[in-house]
Every structure is written in structure tokens, then in C-alpha cells.
Image (spheres, helix red, strand yellow):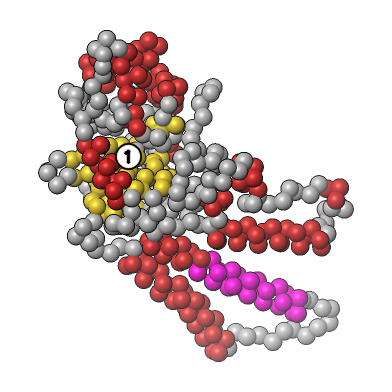
Amino acid sequence: MPGFRPACPHTRPRPEPNPAGPDGAGRTRAQQTNANEPPPMKSRATLPGSRLGAASMRLWGAALAAQLLLAGCGGKDHLRQYPQTTFYPTTEYARTTDWLFKLALVLGVVVGVAVLGILVLFLWKYRYRPGAPEPKQIHGNTRLEVAWTLIPAVILAGIAVPTVKAIFATQPEPPADAVTIEVIGKQWWWEFRYPQPNGDTLVTANEIHVPVGRTVHLLLKSDNVLHSFWVPQMGGKRDLITNRVNHLIFKPEQPGVYFGQCAEFCGTSHSLMRLRMIAHTQAGYQQWLASENAPAAEPAPADSAVALGKQLVVQGACAGCHYIKGTPMAAHVGPALTHFGRRRTLAAGIMDNNAANLHRWLANPPEVKPGSKMPNLNLTDQQITYITAYLQSLQ
Ligand code: CUA
């Protein structure tokens, strides 16, 4: 697909300014990422034969330790390079699982080093020597057997107790003032439904907006296959299952734009089922709600490209699948498009939302997103230009 540049979080810096993370100090990408990269591999010329010199070993040891430390501390550069990192938790939920992971990692390293150390020691101490007597047999030694049953049991309990505590801590009862949002997994995009106090429902897609300082209660559903909602900095993965409602409860603390992704294989374009979570201040969230609740902007003047685009969208095949508030379009097969022009990304977080990418998407959706339920409508270039103008006008 010439020219197609998916917005992969692992291959490009995050496009949006994020008050929650990067410092925005205006450094180049190379400067941003160097701190996280190991020193360049030494050439064979500096490593006589195939053996690593002691100095090289020390260097690599230091580099490895620095990597682990950086990963563990969740440095801001690390976040910029890997926006879906789990090492930069920003909620109580995410910190709980992060702490649990680090505990298990440390215990695992201690046990691994101890077991392998003892193994190597015994291999050396009791190695074969010509003429040596047969070693003393330990079969039936009750004290030893009790010891090597008890020690692993204590270690497992040491992990089980905080694990069970974390399971309960991350599944609390939501408070009465929690912001409830329905999340519906589609193939391969996300629908978000905000029940309103007046009984209406605000429907949007692929970018979920939440307030900081208030508990967010997601009701996770699917009307097709299994999906899994995951915004690593906010909390753990949780499945969306047909005929069942799962709950995900967390309290955002820092305004910003957070990357997320479907984390359960759900078909051809599973890896292209991404999302953004935008955390607002409480005032910003109320503003967003009010503007998002407004009907779509009317094109003016009536003979503009925008108006021609609206005519194509509302009277054409688009109306069979999409919803645009304030127009006759009321279908919910595809994403709601009422304020599509404001979204940062399109096609579920895989591309920046701009005219060129929109043009490419409309020209042949299944080519951009294999298996897409939006078919190639064989639109002409002119029609695509009009439709793009209309969609971009939906601010
Ligand atoms: Cu939805 Cu993977």
C-alpha cells in the first residue's frame, strides 16, 4: 500500500501533546530516544575471537541494568517512544498492577538466581572424578523433602496474597457519581455510548473522553466476537463478551491523550483496532459533552463542496450504516460521525485524521483495513473530495 503510514504507536512518536507525559522540551526524536537505547553493538574487531572481554561484559551489564531501571521507572522518554507502555501508570488501578508485576519480577529473579546458582555449585562440587566413591544418596530424607515442599509453597503464597488483594482492589463498587460509559466492541472499532441525564444517549466512536478526578465506570459489551479493552496507563485489560456486561472502573488523574488497543484476537484487523482516551479537566469534560451533544453543523452556502458532500453522504450508501445527529442518518452499523471532523484519528486510531488519509480510506476501506465491513463503494475522485470536505466540516 504505497504511501500508507499507519499511526503505529511503536514506530512513531505520539502525535498529540500529552500533559500527562512527555515534557515537550522540543528535542529531536534521536535525542528523545537515545536514553532508552542500548549502546551500539561492538563490532567483532573489538571482540577478539568470539569471546566478550571483561570490559564489554561490564558495559553490557550496565546497559542492561540501565534498561531495566528506565523501564521500571517509566521515564518520560520511554513513554514518548512507547505510548502503550505499562511502565507509566497514571491511576491507582494501573499502579496496583504495576506494583504486582514488579513484585513478581523481583521474586522471580531472586528465586531464579538462587536455584541456578545452587545448581551450578552442585554440578561443580559433585562432578565426576575417576575413582571417587558413589555420592551419598538422599532419597527418603524427610527434612529435605519437607524443606523443598515448604519453600515453594511460601513463595507462591507470597505472590498469591498480593495478587488476590489486587484483584479485589481493582474491582471496587463504583461510587454513585461515577461517569458511566458503555463500550461496545465492533469489528474493528469501538462504539462509546454516554447515557445523558435527560434520557438521551450520546453516541461516538474510537475516541473515548473522560474527566479527571472522577471515577469512570465502563460497561464493556460486544455484539460480535470477543474483544479486550486496554488503555495501559489507565488500567488492565478487560474482555468484551457477547451477552455479558463486564466492568472496568478507574479514576483518571492527569489530563492528556492516552493510547489504547484491542488486546484479544478478534479477526483479520485485530491489530488495527486501536483507540485514544482523552482525559479532560472536569470543566473541559463538561464543555466536550455539551459540544458533542450538539447536532452536526449545517453546510453553508448550499452549493459549496461541503453541501454537495452532505448530499452524497445523506442520500447515498453511507446512510445505510452511519449515524449523524441532526440529519436523517440513524443507523449504528458503522461508527457515529456527528463530530467526525474533530477526531484526531480515523479508522479506529490507525491514521491521523486528515484529508489525504480520509481520501485513501474512502477510496478503498478494505485495502487500508483488511476485512473492513465498510465496502469499496467505487466512489469517483470528485465524490471523495466532496465527501471529505463534508466529513471534515463536522466539527
Ligand atoms: Cu477487537 Cu482484537
Residue at 48% across / 80% down in the picture? 154
Magenta stretch holds residue 124: yes
Mark 1 surroundings: few (<14), some (14-19) or many (≥20) residues within 10 A: many
Residue 364 visible in this rendered orientation of the protein: no
Which SS type dominates the magenta stretch? helix
Residue 133: percent from left, percent from top: 78, 85
Instruction: Check the image and report above or below for 30 versus 232.
Output: above
**Residue type at the position of mark 1:** Trp
For the C terminus, the image quarter is top left
| Location of residue 54 in the rendering, given as x and y in whole percent from the top left corner | 82, 63
Q: Which residue is mark 1?
A: 190
Residue 161 appears at what percent x and percent y?
40, 74
**Magenta span covers which residues?**
103-126
Point out residue 118 in the picture as x, y percentages from the top left corner. Answer: 67, 77
Q: Residue at x 54, y 66 (%)?
A: 105
Residue 4 in view here: yes
Horizontal arrangement in the rendering, residue 248 relative to residue 144 (left or right): left
Q: Height in image: 98 above or below 81?
A: below
